[in-house]
Amino acid sequence: MSKINKIYLPILFAIILVIGIFLGKSLNKNPYINYAQMVQANSKLSRIVSYIENRYVDTVSRNKLEEAAIPAMLSELDPHSVYIPAKGMKSVREDMQGNFEGIGVVFNHQTDTSIIISVISGGPSDKVGVQPGDRIIKVNDSLIAGQNISSNDVVKMLKGEKGTTVKVSLKRKNVSKLIDVEIIRDRIPLYSIDVSYMVNKEIGYIKINRFAETTFDEFINGCKKLKKQGVKKLIVDLRGNTGGYMLAATNIADQFLGAGKLIVYTQGKASPRQEIYSTSRGICKNLDVIVLQDEFSASASEILAGAIQDNDRGKIIGRRSFGKGLVQEPYQLSDGSVIRLTIARYYTPTGRSIQKPYDKDKSKYYNDLNERYLNGEFSEADSIHFNDSLKFVTPEGNIVYGGGGIMPDIFVPLDTSGLSKYYAEVLSKGILYTFAFQYADKNRNVLMKYKSAKAINDYLESINIFNQFVKFAKGKGVNKSTKGFDASRHRINTSIKASIARNIIDNEGFYPIMEDLDVTIKKAIEYFETN
């Protein structure tokens, strides 16, 4: 009977659930599952369930079996049909909607103390005078400093429903007593545009980390900001962007295209072909554009890159994207949980399906990126180019490739320069980022005088911040005699300055400094300047 409990019951309930879901939807048009109707749908299944409930050696928890059965059922379909329990839906909604409810600070939890790095302008904490560098000592009179409390637990204490109040006691430098503030929680934006800035007098740069409901508005604001600064050419960075809200991606693609251009279409067995076309409202139609991508760019990122490439609108630079071209439809159950079921595939304007192959052995699918790395596809252009059956032709006669992911027009290998044992140790042990944070925290008053990434970079270079780091690393057990010290010097020095700047002026400080190490951005700049 133990085998039935561990193996056959989840499979049995999976069969019952899937029949109930689709019968309930098609016959009753009811958004919620009615368990009684499911059982009645098949007398054989009904008899089996009754037999198990009546004869099994122990009491059966139907809810527990359902929770185990649904993921098992969906795993037989495709890699992206998933079940989200009710308790997990809140964080999913926050991520997709682009906001959460809390106090509006970013903090670093080091040495058992939560130190505020930045305060969201106009947010709840900003309104009551919370400042970067403040230490969180108590939350609602509960001591958290020095109490071995995890950062996740601190977050849970600070977050809460909009309109509720949390009392926070802060320790501030040069202030002898604790500062007590009552903060009224509110909705806090989760930004999906990391940064937008001018690389030079003509070229602008926008980094999109995901696609949420707010992404399009953030993108428009970023473009307007760059237009005021004279942007003529734009780099859109989708590296590491795993996707999200498809409408945000198509709306952004629309900004670069003239009216009537196909952006993407979707089609499935029970989902008739649906096409999305561009309008005449694009504000970036006169800007040259390059899209950066890598092996982690997926889903909505691939929709945007595919629309730009297939319409001959701009170049794609980087490495082959992930290859996620399946469309999920959310289906809410009565307890608040959701099934996200794949109902269609999406296709680029030339007809390419971006979804990479998958079969019942999901481990191969999830191990695909590792296989690409081992096969040398991160160091040399992908051999998929040579498969003639995967060739597609754009309106201007350019060849593009299907077969799984978006193939770049210009390949950029993974940059391994400056890697060494010394670099690996200071990175893996957190020494680099610990030093950057502690230095910024101790010297915040001086660093705050510098309002740009360039100014902070120049100041840190003038005081030879790298030598200070080397002494700090030695104190943590990593000597400069470690193999590769000289080879890694430039990479480490740049990373330190960028990380310190991030602690002072956020991403506006980090990305412009890190640009010096970014070979993909340099390739995009070179293309713009020579074409």
Image: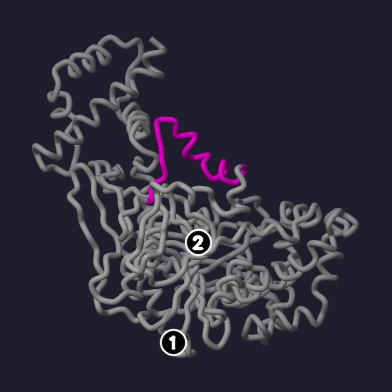
Secondary element type, mark 2 = strand
Residue 436 image-quadrant placement? bottom right
Quarter the N terminus occupies: top left
Secondary element type, mark 1 = helix
- Along the horizontal axis of the image, is 126 left or right of 522? left
Q: What is the crowding at mark 2: few (fewer than 14 residues within 10 Å), some, or many (at least 20)?
A: many
Amino acid marked by disc 1: Lys
Q: Residue furthest left?
A: 27
On residue 227, the disc is 1
**Residue 397 or residue 133, whichever sits in front:** 397
- Along the horizontal axis of the image, is 492 left or right of 37? right
Amino acid marked by disc 2: Gln
Camera sees residue 94:
no
Task: Give the magenta range.
Answer: 354-374
Residue 143 image-quadrant placement? bottom right
Q: Is residue 195 magenta?
A: no
Q: Position of residue 342 (x, y in %)?
A: 30, 44
Residue at 49% x, 40% y is 366
- Along the horizontal axis of the image, is 136 left or right of 75? right
Q: Earlier in the sequence, mark 2 or mark 1?
A: 1
- Please give the residue where the numbered disc 2 appears in the rendered image: 293
